[in-house]
Amino acid sequence: MPQKTKNTPMMEQYFNVKKQYQDAFLFYRLGDFYEMFYDDAIKGSQILELTLTQRNKNAQDPIPMCGVPHHAAQNYIDILVDKGYKVAICEQMEDPKLAKGMVKREVIQLVTPGTIIDEKAGEAKENNYLTALHQKGNDYGFAYVDLSTGELKSTVLSSLAATENEILSLHTKEIVLDKSASDETLKMLKKLKILISHQEEVKQQAESSYAVQDLTRSSEISAVEHLLMYLTVTQKRALVHLQKAVHYEASHFLKLDHYAKRNLDLLSNTRTGKKSGTLLWLLDSTRTAMGGRLLKQWIERPLVNKQKIEARQEKVLSLLNHYFERSSLQEALTKVYDLERLAGRVAFGSINGRDLIQLKTSLENVPQIRYVLEQLNEGQFDDILEQLDPVEEVADLIERAIVEEPSISVTEGNLIKKGYDAKLDEYKDAMKNGKKWLAQLEATEREQTGIHNLKIGYNRVFGYYIEITKANLTRLPQDRYQRKQTLTNAERFITPELKEKEDLILDAKNKATELEYQLFVEIREQVKDQIKRLQKLAHGLAQLDVIQSFAVVSEDAHLVCPELDNEKHTLKIEAGWHPVVEKVVGRQSYVPNDILMLPDTEVLLITGPNMSGKSTYMRQLALTVIMAQMGCFVPAKKAQLPIFDQIFTRIGAADDLISGESTFMVEMKEANEALKNASANSLLLFDELGRGTATYDGMALAQAIIEYIHNNVHAKTLFSTHYHELTVLDKSLGHLKNIHVGAVEKNGELVFLHKIEDGPADKSYGIHVAKLAGMPDNLIERASIILDKLEDTPVSNKAADEKIKPVIDTTETPNMLEEEQLSLFGGSQIANKQVMPTKKQNKIINEIEDVNLMSMTPMEVMNIVYKWQEELHKK
Ligand code: ADP
Ligand code: MG
């Protein structure tokens, strides 16, 4: 740090603080501003578009500086943190007016991307997770926390790939590491561009020993401890709302890797990045922010336990069948605010009067919700009811204490209700009644003394006084008042009563404000004692909210309750549809389809023209499975499903832009993940695999992959392909079934039926699709000629046909003809190469074509054949 000239004491203090926060912008409070200096100022002024100025302009080396007004600081902090930076807020710890020497300053909070809790508009239904990792051999202890809600979860992951997947799924922006992370791990995190924060030292703290109580594995405990230590160090306050770490096992949920989540448009649309067009968009009729966040978690982690799934189904069914009760629950839920985050802010100490009113309003709705639910309950709502504790003490306390429309600030009064605190009421009375009281005193004193011009006045030195003119002094009884001041023609007096009231009147406002704040803090502390109960309630309400959302969607979209059947391994969907596509294109235009995979069917090979609905059909199954295992109803007339352990997908041709990998590489990676990790209980979706590379090796890979799955993995697999040649596989693979999407030709135009039928498609219709796409007529005609020829000619001789040789310059695609020669299913490359006619052979072929056998004698024929043979044998 540049320090040529001798620093002022203030800059000395600045450097001392900055030393501890090298990786953060230091917002250093100076009067009404937060200032940044040196590099912070240079970089900060650019990012925040602030004017860069200088401190000590005239010194030899002035200090770059820029600042933001303290009341607007939050905006600037948000911008920096949003961009992935940290901001250390350094406050004045004493009143500069009263300070002797340098004003004491301290960092009161380090704001980081993983610890922001001030939610912005539109983010109420989002979680912001801070994660931590502790590596120990092959154990990846992993923990994550949402500081705003106190949710804390942990697990042990068994590979770096699983860890990467978890990090991506949580959309974490910041990860806390200790020294245990390997180079490989660091490389992965850098690739994902996640802010890495270091927390090496861990001190014993009460919070963390509570948090890790239920954990057993050391790597997991370490991860939680580091995470909590980092929070303590950055937030610098007790965080009583942090929940006990809940251990989770990836195997207790339907595993969906990051690729699958993205490919299936679960939470965000792959093309637009928005919510619209996603499963979340379809299912989200939640009424509370808590429900919204829980719904996302359920979508990302569907269940695998039949009882647990059915427990959700029963609840949905009950709400589906009881419209009025459901409406009344919805109405009540709409009035429930974000209890989880309110509880978090109580713990954080950042709650204000309005938040408490929101808390009260929310709690007041709980009895109604309980009542309705109890009416419906036949056991299915027991677990939710158990959590719906109305926390009456808190509701009552707020009702008694807090005014209905409190100020936003907690230090400016207007918070506490009349009747809550006698002292405060006295202050307020004094404020309001001060003048009235004085007037009354004046009146009674006049009456009792008989002095009509007796008056009560006020001056700043002596305060309130009773003034009696000299002429009237004789009428004043001895010792009635104490003399205070003598003027030329009057005397001023006080009484102990007046003195006492004076204090009240003068300080009433200040004191009231101060007392209100004190009382507010006391109330906040009392609410804080009930945080665990509030969190439990919040969780119960969130679940109920998601369930009612399922019921709403099930009713609107006519979903059915699927029958889950793990033993028989039967998948039977009658008249099912893709719920999102259907919602977009409309019910009338959507053609429902069956999906049938009896226990002996493992692979469905789907053929059909482009745009006929193959991808839609596959995604439909994936979404149906996910919805079913979330406990939601599914888009079909009837559905019977096995419970899957994992879904793997290879869908679409999305380039992995983040990591800059090519389509084909991504395709192979996704396929590899599936082959490596899938079990017989998994669902595999391969959409046009092999498209990203040249025809033959793509087709070769596709076939080999199908065979591998069929012979080794035994997972239920949907494989769509444009390689028509693959449909013969049903001859050799017993558990493979061909299906196709129907299309009919009408007057040379293609009409998609979107209807799935048994057996392979008869052609691939590519040219028709090209025609629909508006390609030039002569191009389409030319393609038809080439196709006809290709279809007439045996594979091995195709290229020999002059008519289908490319009309374009062959030098540009030198390998094309040779490639066309290769038969995938037939002989080897070498064998096929021999079929390629040489110049000599071609000449002979031409001669054969030209001879007129009818005009020749048998002998002549013998001779000419002999000549050809000679020529052919000649080297
Ligand atoms: P493919 O994968 O065969 O090329 P897609 O699955 O991408 O075809 O479907 C193409 C379009 O056809 C979709 O965008 C959708 O609008 C429509 N579609 C697909 N399936 C159906 C269906 N069953 N009913 C109505 N429209 C459908
Ligand atoms: Mg497709």
Image: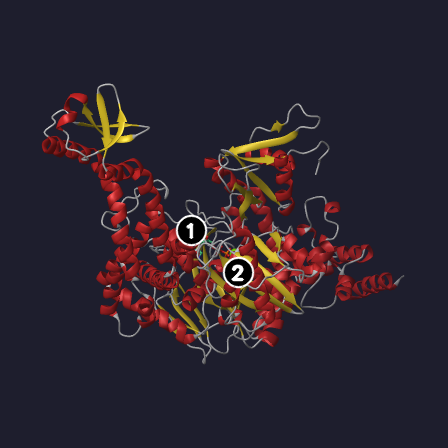
**Which image quarter holds the N terminus?**
top right
Viewed as shown, does residue 818 lie left or right of 50? right
- Image-quadrant location for residue 224: bottom right
| Up-down relation of residue 520 to residue 486 (above or below) | below
Viewed as shown, does residue 471 lie left or right of 85? left
Q: Which numbered dot is residue 233? A: none
Q: Residue furthest toward the right? A: 875
- Image-quadrant location for residue 158: bottom right
Regarding residue 761, the answer to whether it shows in the image is no
Proximity of marks 1 and 2: CB atoms separated by less than 8 Å: no
CA distance separating discs 1 and 2: 22 Å
Q: Position of residue 802 (x, y in %)?
A: 70, 51
Q: From the viewer's side, name the closer residue of 751 and 651.
A: 651
Callout 2 amino acid: Tyr
Q: How did the renderer colour the structure? A: secondary structure
Regarding residue 220, the answer to whether it shows in the image is yes
Q: Position of residue 232 (x, y in %)?
A: 54, 56
| Up-down relation of residue 453 to residue 518 (above or below) | above
Viewed as shown, does residue 772 lie left or right of 690? left
Instruction: Find numbered disc 2 in the image and state the secondary structure of the residue it sits on.
Output: strand
Q: Which residue is mark 2?
A: 144
| Up-down relation of residue 286 to residue 446 (above or below) | below
Q: Position of residue 613 (x, y in %)?
A: 47, 57
Instruction: Find numbered disc 1 in the image and state the secondary structure of the residue it sits on.
Output: loop
Q: Is label 1's Cβ within 8 Å of ligand 1? A: no
Q: Which of pointers 1 and 2 indicates the residue nearer the eye? A: 1
Q: Which numbered dot is residue 349? A: 1
Viewed as shown, does residue 373 lie left or right of 161? left
Q: Is label 2's Cβ within 8 Å of ligand 2? A: no
Callout 1 amino acid: Gly
**Which image quarter holds the C terminus?**
bottom right
